[in-house]
Image (cartoon, rainbow, N blue to C red):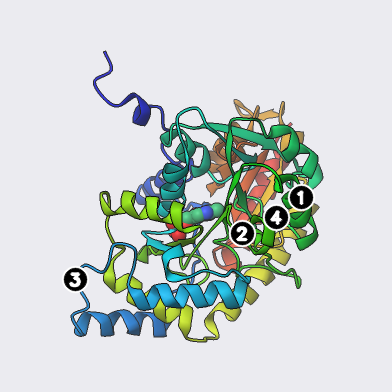
Amino acid sequence: MNRYSELVSSIEESRTMAVTSLITKLKAEGKNVLSFSAGEPDFPTPGFVKQAAIKAIHENFTRYTPNEGHPPLIKAIVKKFKEENNLNFEEKNILVSDGAKHSIYNMLMALCNPGDEVIFQAPYWVSYPEMVKLAQAVPVVIEAGVERHYKITPSQLEKAITASTKAFIFNTPSNPTGAVYSKKEILALAEVLKNKNVYVISDEIYEKIIFDNEKHFSIGSIDYLKDKVITVNGVSKAYAMTGWRVGYAGGNAEVIKLARNLQSHSTSNASSISQAAAMAALTQTSEEVTVMVDKFKSRRDFIFESLNRVKGIKCPLPKGAFYVFFDVSDYFGSHVNGYKINDSNTFCNYLLNEESVGLVPGFAFGDDSCVRMSYACSMDELQEGLKRITRGLGKLN
Ligand SMILES: Cc1ncc(COP(=O)(O)O)c(C=O)c1O
């Protein structure tokens, strides 16, 4: 007899977190493991943000804030959306939550009824399918392979939509692939959604980590979609604030109201101190973001060129975020020392056990031909990692 919730029992542990825990355990055992599994910037939170939090503590800004967020922060988010994303919201359209993950969860819960379908692409961020299931909806996955640079086409989207479709989760720049959809590509996807009764949850958490003069474009800024798009963002990635847990969503007042109600009975407001810090991040100009993005770009260039020199690896150029997602299926069927490589998991286990290199298997992101490597680490680590990967793969027959 299952004594626990069947719904929650159907959810899997976040696989990226599972890999990170395994690597931490191996390190604690004294192994010189190089981890490329990080889903967070390796830079410290900017000093002016920390100062704002310290000031908030000294000024006793330590009590509950309104459930939906500290009013000045909500104002700052309205301004940010207007100026940077061309999204016209009022205060009633905003909800501040405990990270963008929490914002997406709140929105799915506010939108879905049992049996509704929610579309997203593979490769996808690990939490989408599990959050959709928690909302008692059905995940519908569109495959976007390496040959299309991990982007879906309008006709694929069209085919995936049924009378039961409630929402489409869209993520650019993307985790795990680093793919960035251009304005033109987004307009073409939007055309498909034009006369459909489908909401869009636009996950824009990597908005600022974008390279090669690509411009981030918010799908919610398309006039005919504006009431159907919920735009989610946060401070975790752009300001190296993953531990502070502040994310936010902007959308039509009705769905935001439902999500506010849900949050009022589950977590209430995001930490007051973190909200003060987030406000500094969103309102004060700083060099830190640019410096961080420049560093990510140099690492991206290095890792992209180096990986593509390794026989059997196919790696499209990521245009944003801080991951490379590369196809290793040429190695499937090869073996050495009792290891047989059949899939992304056996590939990653081999490199972890034999070369002490931690990569995340692509099956965690819905693409078993690939693996994800984060470059949120030092150049020295990347160089040493590349050496180990090349050596390990060179031994396979
Ligand atoms: C695509 C994507 N969306 C949302 C999040 C959640 O970010 P947070 O909850 O830290 O704001 C992440 C974090 O890894 C992510 O990769």
What residue would you read off at disc 1?
191
- Residue mark closest to the camera, 2 vs 3: 2
Q: CA distance from mark 1 to mark 3?
A: 46 Å
What residue would you read off at disc 2?
226
Sequence-wise, the earlier of marks 1 and 4 is 4
What residue would you read off at disc 4?
179
Sequence-wise, the earlier of marks 2 and 3 is 3
- Residue 315 appearing in the image: no
Q: CA distance from mark 4 to mark 3?
A: 40 Å
Disc 3: residue Cβ within 8 A of ligand 1's nearest atom:
no
Circles 4, 3 touching at the beta carbon (< 8 Å): no
Is 349 left, or right, of 276 in this rendering? right
Q: CA distance from mark 1 to mark 4?
A: 21 Å
Q: As shown in the figure, which amino acid type bears the numbered disc 2?
A: Lys
What residue would you read off at disc 3?
63
Up-down relation of residue 282 to residue 38 (above or below)? below
Q: As shown in the figure, which amino acid type bears the numbered disc 4?
A: Ala
Q: CA distance from mark 4 to mark 2?
A: 24 Å
| Residue drawn at the location 51% of the way across and 65% of the way down | 237
Up-down relation of residue 257 to residue 113 (above or below)? below
Sequence-wise, the earlier of marks 1 and 3 is 3
- Residue mark closest to the camera, 1 vs 4: 1
